[in-house]
Amino acid sequence: MLDINNIRNDFPALHQLVYKKPLVYLDNAATTQKPKVVIDTLLEYYNKQNSNIHRGVHYLSQQATVAYEEARICVQKFINAAYSHEIIFTRGATESINLVASSFGKKFLKKGDEIIISGMEHHSNIVPWQLACEEKQAFLKIIPFNENGELIIEDLEKLITEKTKLVAITHISNALGTINPVKKIIEIAHKHNIPVLLDGAQAVPHLKIDVQELDCDFYCFSGHKMYAPMGVGVLYGKEKMLEELPPYQGGGEMIKNVTFEKTTYNELPFKFEAGTPNVGDGLALAAAIKYLEDLGMENIKLHETELLKYATKKLSEIKNFRMIGTAKEKAAVISFLVGNIHPSDMGIILDKLGIAVRTGHHCTQPIMDFYKIPGTVRASFALYNTFEEVDVLVEGVKKAKEMLS
Ligand code: PMP
C-alpha cells in the first residue's frame, strides 16, 4: 500500500491554496504535478552540468552525454524495449506520432492506401494521419465504439484490406478512460502483417508497459503526463521499423556525413534526433521514471483503481449525474455531465472551490459528436490523490448543481 500523505510531501505544488481553499488537483490527464526529485534534477542540470552533448571534448559535455544516454537506457528498461536505440527522444506524444505519420507516410503510403485509427483518438492521433493521407491520397478508416465507450474490435477484421498500411490506436482514452484491448488489436493486425502504433500518453503513468510483451511496433508518450517536465517525450519503435523509416527532420546530430552532393544519415536513435536535444528534461524524465519505479507501478494502479471505484460510486449517487465512458476496463478518469448544466459552468464553480478539473472536448471532438454533447467535465486522478479529495469533488459537484439548477 502506498503512503499517500507521505507521497504528497514529495509534490510542492500540491500544498497551496487557490482562492483560499486547499488545491484539489484533478486535471492529471492534462498534466501531472512534479515531484521534488524531478525539479531538483532539472535544477542540478542547469546549475552544474549544462553543456551541449555528443562530440564534446570537454568534461561537462562528456558528463552530460553519459547522463543523457543513461536516461535513454532508463526509458528502455521502463517499457522493456529490446535496445536503447529503439528509444527516440521527442517533444512529446504529439511529436512522436507526427514523426511516424510523416516518415511512415513518405516511405510506405501510396494512393488509395488505408490507415486505421479508432473513433476515440485524441486529435494528436487523428490529424497527423489526415495530413499523411492527404499528401498521398490515402484514406482513414475508423474503428467505432459503443455507448459505453468500448471499441467494437470485431469491426477491425472487417476494416482491414490489402490496402491497409498501419493501425494507430490509443492505449487509454483521455476523454473516456477506456483501457483498450491493445494486445488483441495488435494480434489481429499482425495476422495481416500490419504494424501497430499505440498512443500511450494516458497509459504510461498508470500501467506497467512492456512493449515486447505487447509486440507493438511503435509506442508514443509524453513526459509531462508521467510526473516529468513538459517538452520531453518518447517514441519507441522496433529496430527493424525505425531502420526502414526515412529521417523526420534534418539538421545536426542526425547525419553521418554531409556534402553538397549527398548526405548520409546517422545510426539509430540519432537519425531521428536532429538538433540540440532537450538534455535537462531527458534527465528529469529518467528521475520521474525512477520515482515511479520506487513506488511500483502495480501499487500505483491499485491505489488509482480504488480511487476510481470510490469516486464512481459517490458521484453516481448524485441525481442526474451522467458518466460519459463506462467501459469495463477503465483508468482513473471520470468524464461527466450533470443534468443540463454546461460543463464549463460546472468547471468554473469547481475552480472557485479550489478543485481543478478540465472541461470541454478534451481534444476528442469525434467522441463528443458521438454522444451529441458539447463537452464534459473531466476529473482525472493521479497517484497522489486521496479519498478525501474525492469527497471534496463530490460536495463541489453537489454545490455547483444547486447553484446552477
Ligand atoms: N494522446 C492522448 C491520449 C492524450 O491524452 C494527449 C494529451 N492530452 C496526447 C496524445 C498529446 O500529448 P502531448 O500534448 O503531450 O503531446
Image: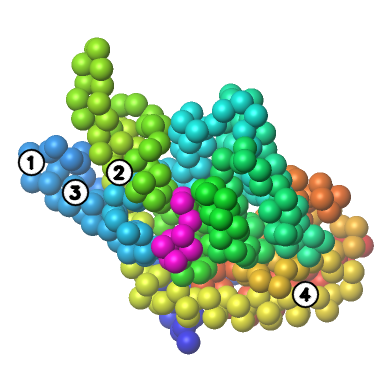
Q: Earlier in the sequence, mark 3 or mark 1?
A: 1
Circle 4 crowding by C-alpha within 10 Å: few under 14, some 14–19, many from 20: many
Q: Nearer the viewer, residue 278 or 79?
A: 79
The three-letter amino acid code for the residue at tag 4 is Leu
Q: Earlier in the sequence, mark 2 or mark 3?
A: 3
- 29 relative position to 107: left or right: right
Q: Residue 337's mark? A: none
Residue at mark 3: C-beta within 8 A of ligand 1: no
Q: Nearer the viewer, residue 253 or 58?
A: 253
Judge whether 44 appears above or below 401 on screen.
Answer: above
Determine whether the residue tagged by mark 2 lies in a helix, strand or loop: loop
Residue most extreme to the bottom: 1
Determine whether the residue tagged by mark 1 lies in a helix, strand or loop: loop
* Colour scheme employed for the rendering of this structure: rainbow
Circle 1 crowding by C-alpha within 10 Å: few under 14, some 14–19, many from 20: few
Residue range (magenta): 210-218
Q: Quadrant of residue 241?
A: top left
The three-letter amino acid code for the residue at tag 1 is His
Residue labelled with disc 1: 58
Q: Residues under labels 1 and 4: Cα distance?
A: 58 Å
